[in-house]
């Protein structure tokens, strides 16, 4: 497999990992909402108890309920699960679930994997650039940039089973669209032409996502830098924000923030997939 082919596959992998992370955040939001509803309904079911491994007091008594016990009364969202020697508030229970949930751990793994893939994409791009430079002499650095981008476009075509030579002039639309995708990965630009393509593509991507209805950029942790999207999403920082909301008895606000973040991630990944599909549609048209 060529370097360009590997790079293209890693781009798709990167997008997929962000999608999976978004789905985990949505699932975690549902879990928090479910816990809150049980608390509001004065219920303490075994599934909730296993999160913190604590007992509960029934009404004003000192009966300890564990594991598969029934449903004792709670005293509002700020109520306390009271064991014989410990008292654990509902807020603490929900916070513990946020921090220790298997769903949260899965989301963390996805973010970590995305960051590793991002580094790999940059390395593959640099490797491809060096390979093309060794293969041919480029008097103008812009010609090298164009050749590298065309090689990536060829790899996209090969992924769809298309094999033909790309005319540089007719592929400018595809090149700019590819620039938007590469800019979202945070690709570093050395050459002038590459810098222009990344900037143009980033601007097109931002316009597309805003046009689709996205209005909460930055709220979920996704940044607009230099006119383009950069996945500056740090799950650890976002988790601190959600934890703070919960501890202030704003569980609903925390779960909504989780869903907002997930929606933002999915809106951008959907735009990226659509851009890649548009590139391939142009290939298909020319292949007819």
Image (cartoon, rainbow, N blue to C red):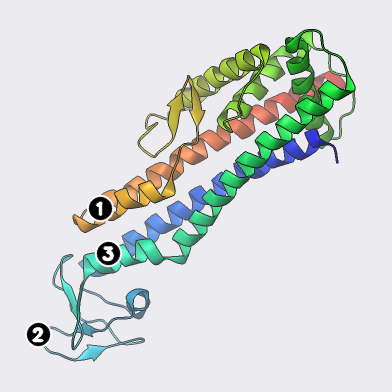
- Decide: is 52 above or below 276: below
Spot occupied by residue 182 in the image (x, y as percentages of width and height)? 63, 28
Spot occupied by residue 259 in the image (x, y as percentages of width and height)? 39, 47
Q: Nearer the viewer, mark 3 or mark 2?
A: 2
Spot occupied by residue 251 in the image (x, y as percentages of width and height)? 26, 56
Which residue carries the number 1 mark? 244
- Mark 2 crowd level (few <14, some 14–19, many ≥20, 10 Å Cα): few
Determine the secondary structure under disc 1.
helix
Could one spot residue 230 in this view of the protein?
yes
Could one spot residue 251 in this view of the protein?
no
Judging depth in this view, the residue of 50 and 199 nearest the camera is: 199
- Mark 3 crowd level (few <14, some 14–19, many ≥20, 10 Å Cα): few
- Mark sitting on residue 37: 3
Q: Earlier in the sequence, mark 1 or mark 2?
A: 2
Identify which residue is drawn at 50% across, 31% down: 230
Q: The C terminus appears in which quarter of the rendering? A: top right
Q: Earlier in the sequence, mark 1 or mark 3?
A: 3
- Mark sitting on residue 60: 2
- Decide: is 206 above or below 54: above
Q: Quick check: marks 3 and 2 in contact, CB under 8 Å?
A: no
């Amino acid at each position: 497999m060529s370097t360009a082919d590997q790079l293209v596959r890693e781009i798709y992998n990167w997008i997929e990992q962000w999608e999976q992370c978004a789905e985990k955040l949505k699932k975690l939001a549902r879990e928090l909402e479910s816990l809150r509803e049980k608390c509001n309904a004065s219920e303490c079911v075994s599934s909730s108890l296993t999160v913190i491994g604590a007992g509960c007091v029934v009404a004003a008594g000192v009966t300890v309920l564990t594991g598969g016990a029934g449903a004792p009364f709670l005293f509002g969202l700020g109520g306390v699960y009271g064991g014989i020697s410990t008292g654990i508030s509902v807020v603490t229970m929900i916070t513990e679930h946020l921090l220790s949930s298997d769903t949260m751990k899965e989301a963390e793994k996805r973010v970590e994997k995305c960051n590793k893939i991002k580094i790999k994409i940059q390395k593959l791009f640099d490797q491809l650039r060096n390979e093309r430079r060794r293969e041919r002499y480029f008097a103008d650095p812009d010609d090298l940039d164009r050749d590298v981008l065309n090689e990536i476009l060829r790899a996209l075509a090969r992924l769809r089973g298309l094999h033909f030579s790309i005319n540089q002039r007719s592929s400018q639309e595809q090149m700019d669209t590819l620039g938007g995708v590469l800019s979202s990965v945070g690709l570093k630009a050395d050459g002038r032409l590459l810098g222009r393509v990344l900037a143009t593509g980033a601007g097109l991507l931002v316009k597309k996502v805003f046009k689709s209805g996205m209005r909460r950029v930055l709220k979920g942790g996704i940044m607009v830098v230099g006119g383009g999207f950069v996945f500056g999403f740090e799950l650890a920082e976002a988790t601190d924000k959600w934890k703070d909301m919960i501890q202030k008895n704003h569980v609903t606000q925390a779960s909504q923030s989780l869903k907002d973040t997930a929606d933002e991630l999915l809106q951008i990944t959907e735009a990226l997939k659509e851009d890649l599909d548009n590139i391939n549609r142009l290939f298909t048209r020319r292949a007819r």
